[in-house]
Amino acid sequence: MNLQHSLSRSALPRYAFLACAALFLAGCADSSPGSNTVVSSSGGSGSSGSSGSSGSGNCKPGTNGCQTIVACPAGTTFKPFVNATSSDTTFVASMAQSGLCLGCSVANTQNVVDPATSDPATISIPVGLLNGDASITVEDTSTTYPAGDLVGFIVSVPGADLLNLAVLQPVTVTSVDITSTSSTDVSSAGSTRPVALDLLSLLANTGETVATVTSTGPFNAVRLDVSGVANVLTNIDVYAAGACVANP
């Protein structure tokens, strides 16, 4: 199934879409009337941590001093699921593996919610793996988000061009409703799902994108699954989760 690439939820004029596609990795953000490019410089609670360094020099929304622009749909703003301090537990990250995922690994899971670093977590899948997957879930323990919100993860694929959407073929993003007694998948998007991923652009972060799903019901968590079925991806860097929420 082909993934559809959307820099915003609104329809872009053909010339604007082609220009943004050509300049995406150089940091193009949609400026059409139907989109809302937002400078994200704090987490959901107001991050006060110091920004660490990443190999590409990019910054993570929710870390101190980060001026990354995320192209959310009109009327919404990107809210990073990143804690205010390293000791805060509003956002909780966890990892899991399923199936026969021999050789799979998830490294530095807590990086995705830690405001003190811009370094990513990394999901690794062995080349040739026929089944099984590894995942990262981020839960917001204080807020439930409504149906219709976009939610997902800021990701990059080392050494790959994200304009080649086949690179993200084995990636699935799922909104999740977690309670004290259960965890229920709400909506999923990805190559093995009827719904394709929406890919939002980041202005300042070269080589990164925001892989999202529009949730059809209330949720308070989001999960990123990477499977080995397609055998086209070995590593994916995961910087942070977040949602496009209604402007106050």
Image: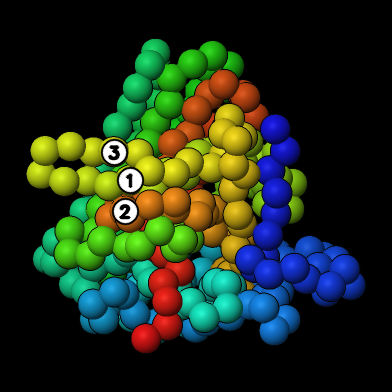
Instruction: Answer with left or right where residue 93 lies relative to residue 171.
Output: left
Few, some or many residues within 10 Å of mark 1 (<14, 14–19, 20+): many
Residue 117, position as x, y percentages in the image: 32, 65
Is residue 131 visible in the rendered structure shown here? Answer: yes
Q: Name the residue under label 2.
A: 219
Residue 67 x %, y %? 48, 82
**Which residue type does callout 2 highlight?**
Phe
Residue type pointed to by label 3: Thr
Give the residue drawn at x 27%, y 47%. 177
Res 19 seen here: no
Q: Which quadrant is the N terminus positioned in?
A: top right
* Residue carrying label 1: 176
Marks 1 and 2 close (CB-CB < 8 Å):
yes
Q: Earlier in the sequence, mark 1 or mark 2?
A: 1
Q: Which residue is drawn at 14% across and 61% down?
A: 89
Q: Disc 1 versus disc 3: distance between alpha carbons?
A: 6 Å
First along the sequence among labels 1 and 3: 1
The three-letter amino acid code for the residue at tag 1 is Val
Tell me the SS state at disc 1.
strand
Q: Is residue 2 left or right of residue 54?
A: right
Display colour scheme: rainbow
Marks 1,3: beta carbons within 8 A: yes
User: In terms of depth relative to the viewer, which is nearer, 186 or 198?
Assistant: 186
Q: Position of residue 170 (x, y in %)?
A: 57, 33
Q: In which quarter of the image is the C terminus?
A: bottom left
